[in-house]
Amino acid sequence: MAGALIIVLREAIEAGLIIGIVLAATRGIRLAHALCRRCIFVGLLGRYCRVLRRRYIQRRLRVPAGSSSMLAFSARVIMLAWDISGWLATAAR
């Protein structure tokens, strides 16, 4: 339980850092703050819909909660490795 709390806290700090950087970078642009607020709202709404969809799929397929989170973690690792290798390939040119 404490591990999950640390992960949530780290993610919240990271999100705040990214939002702060974006707001600082767009300081002189008109309507930038309103656009950032809309993007944050849409991101939270999307996250909520994703949680609801995952719960629905788990109930329909009768998948244990641990196995689906392991599959999601594996997919994230694969996507991250793919992104990094693509970035390295373009940076090497």
Image (spheres, rainbow, N blue to C red):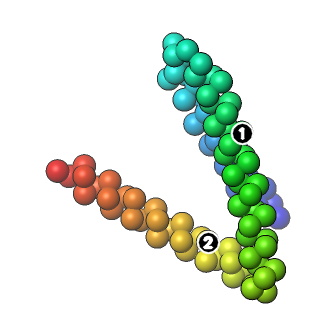
User: Circle 1 sits on which residue?
Assistant: 41
In three-dimensional space, the C-alpha distance between marks 2 and 1, rounded to whole angstroms, equals 24 Å
Q: Is 41 or 79 nearer to us in this picture?
A: 41
Q: Position of residue 82 (x, y in %)?
A: 39, 65
First of labels 2, 1 by sequence position: 1
Disc on res. 72? 2
Q: Position of residue 49 (x, y in %)?
A: 74, 57
Q: Is residue 10 visible?
A: no
Q: Is residue 13 above or below residue 48?
A: above
Q: Is residue 61 above or below residue 71?
A: below
**Residue at 74% from the left image edge and 67% from the top image edge:** 53
Dot 1: element: helix
**Residue at 68% from the left image edge and 78% from the top image edge:** 68
Q: Mark 2 belongs to which amino acid?
A: Ala
Q: Residues within 10 Å of mark 2 (few under 14, many from 20)?
A: few
Q: Position of residue 18 (x, y in %)?
A: 58, 36
Quarter residue 39 falls in:
top right
Q: Is residue 58 visible?
A: yes
Q: Position of residue 21 (x, y in %)?
A: 55, 29
Dot 2: element: helix
Q: Mark 1 belongs to which amino acid?
A: Phe
Quarter residue 42 falls in:
top right
Q: Residues within 10 Å of mark 1 (few under 14, many from 20)?
A: few
**Residue at 32% from the left image edge and 53% from the top image edge:** 87
The reply, left or right, for residue 78 in relation to residue 49 is left
**Residue at 68% from the left image edge and 73% from the top image edge:** 69
Marks 2 and 1: CB-CB under 8 Å? no
Disc on res. 50? none
Q: Is residue 86 above or below residue 44?
A: below
